[in-house]
């Protein structure tokens, strides 16, 4: 096995269980021939630290999977998948929630792929080339651990030529739409429509809060609404009116479908296909106010007129949203941007509220839910940050 020497600080981190290898962690940049195969990470004295692989992905250069010299074979994958499944037995026994994450990459001990359960179907996401090469072994392990699965699909979340981003892998085909339940609410999902399925499972606790009645009798402006899942959750929790705003043309039909399967009427729940920034101008001109404005933009987005990134522009976005929040209203500010810390995110939001001179109280905070297991040695893996602010 090739050996990859890491820097002294990284040596300490690996010894503490840190699983991620970044470019700055290795002494020499690994050659192409050292990539995409199992390697041993060693310290300054060539001492063994752990086994894993080098294969660049969004989070870094590679992962440590084991701190012993155990073989990283079918049994290893089965063991990790089984542990992860056992930890989620509450989810598997729930009739109220039928879609959740069953394997969260490094959080469950193997960086590079995740597996979601959608009412009997598995959705596997590959995040780098090496783990994709190991697909056969991983599929065999999944087959052994999930004999009850009705079928499986894959999503390729790294650069690769000539391969579809989403594909059916094995077993039966899921109905279209595939209805899943989350805290008793039905959502329409699609197992094989590009990278997104219609619902982001990591927001289940925020949706649950809305379904529980946080906005009962209130109005909601749901921005970057995608399929309107937050609007549906709020409406079922008693919100009297919701407005879902998204730039993508598909969002109209998709949101309509989510409302319809939950017997919600389009008279009280409107869908606007528009750039959020244009909608803010429109709403300000019209003097519209909402009891709650929810912000959940992508980490980075480019539209005809705007380039938006959470790291640079969340403050501006919040400042514009605040002027649409009614007296005693609520701001829900969410991001999944891993490059923005919780503290920095909070500062951006609070500075923006202060521009308006409004008093505020931060009332709730959500990060990743229990099924999105986080590796304790790598807390940065907990990318989700959702703050609730009560305004005056
Ligand atoms: N909040 C959603 C997920 C948002 S995904 C949920 O919980 O389900 C991000 C969405 O932002 C995408 O649907 C994309 O079409 C939309 N989007 C990106 N830039 C936009 C813009 N400038 N105005 C409106 N929507 C935008």
Image (spheres, grey):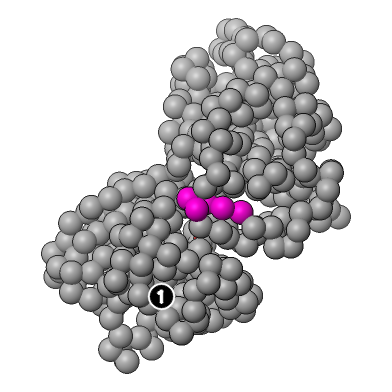
The x and y percentages for residue 339 are 45, 48
Q: Nearer the viewer, residue 30 or 168?
A: 168
Q: Nearer the viewer, residue 242 or 385?
A: 242
Residue 114, picture quadrant: top right
Observer able to see residue 348: no
Relative to the observer, which residue lies in front, 316 or 295? 295
Q: Residue furthest bottom?
A: 286
Q: Is residue 231 above or below residue 75?
A: below
Count of all numbered marks drawn on residues in the image: 1
Residue at horizontal 53 percent and vertical 67 percent from the top: 262
Residue 117 at what x, y percent from top left?
A: 65, 43
> Can you say whether 339 is above or below 236 in the image?
above
Residue drawn at the location 45% of the way across and 68% of the way down: 231
Q: Main secondary structure of the magenta part?
A: strand
Mark 1 beta carbon near ligand 1 (under 8 Å): no
Q: Secondary structure at mark 1?
A: strand
Residue 326: image location, x then y, percent: 23, 76
Q: Is residue 299 left or right of residue 140?
A: left
Residue 362, magenta (yes or no)? no
Quadrant location of the N terminus in the rendered image: top right
Residue neighbourhood size for the residue with mark 1, other residues' Cα within 10 Å, grouped as few (<14), some (14–19), many (≥20): many
Residue 333 lies, in percent from the top left, at 35, 60
Residues in magenta, as a range = 180-184
> Is there any visible trace of residue 45 in the rendered image?
yes
Q: Nearer the viewer, residue 361 or 316?
A: 361
């Amino acid at each position: 096995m090739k050996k990859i020497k890491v820097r002294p600080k990284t040596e300490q981190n690996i010894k503490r269980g840190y699983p991620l290898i970044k470019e700055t962690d290795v002494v020499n940049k690994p050659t192409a021939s050292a990539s995409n195969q199992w390697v041993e990470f060693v310290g300054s004295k060539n001492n063994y630290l752990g086994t894993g692989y080098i294969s660049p992905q969004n989070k870094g250069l590679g992962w440590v999977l084991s701190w012993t010299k155990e073989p990283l074979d079918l049994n290893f994958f089965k063991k990790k998948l089984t542990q992860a499944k056992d930890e989620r037995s509450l989810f598997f026994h729930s009739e109220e929630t039928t879609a959740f994450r069953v394997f969260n990459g490094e959080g469950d001990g193997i960086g590079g792929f995740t597996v979601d359960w959608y009412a009997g179907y598995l959705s596997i996401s590959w995040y780098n080339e090496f783990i994709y090469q190991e697909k056969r072994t991983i599929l065999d392990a999944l087959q052994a651990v999930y004999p009850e699965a009705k079928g499986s699909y894959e999503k390729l979340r790294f650069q690769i030529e000539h391969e579809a981003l989403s594909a059916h892998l094995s077993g039966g085909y899921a109905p279209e739409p595939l209805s899943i339940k989350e805290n008793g609410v039905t959502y329409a999902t699609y197992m094989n429509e590009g990278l997104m399925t219609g619902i982001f499972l990591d927001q289940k606790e925020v949706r649950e809060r809305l379904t529980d009645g946080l906005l009962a009798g209130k109005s909601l402006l749901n921005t970057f609404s995608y399929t309107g899942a937050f609007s549906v959750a709020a409406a079922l929790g008693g919100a009297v009116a919701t407005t879902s705003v998204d730039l993508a043309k598909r969002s109209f039909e998709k949101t309509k479908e989510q409302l319809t399967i939950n017997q919600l009427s389009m008279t009280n729940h409107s869908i606007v296909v528009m750039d959020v920034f244009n909608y803010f101008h429109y709403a300000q001109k019209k003097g519209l106010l909402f009891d709650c404005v929810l912000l959940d933009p992508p980490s980075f987005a480019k539209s005809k007129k705007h380039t938006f990134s959470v790291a640079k522009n969340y403050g501006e976005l919040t400042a514009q949203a605040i002027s649409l929040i009614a007296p005693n209203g609520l701001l829900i500010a969410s991001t999944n941007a891993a490059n923005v810390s919780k503290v920095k995110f909070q500062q951006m939001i609070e500075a923006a509220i202060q521009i308006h001179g409004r008093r505020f109280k931060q009332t709730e905070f959500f990060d990743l839910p229990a099924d999105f297991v986080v590796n304790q040695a790598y807390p940065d893996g907990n990318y989700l940050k959702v703050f609730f602010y009560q305004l005056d």
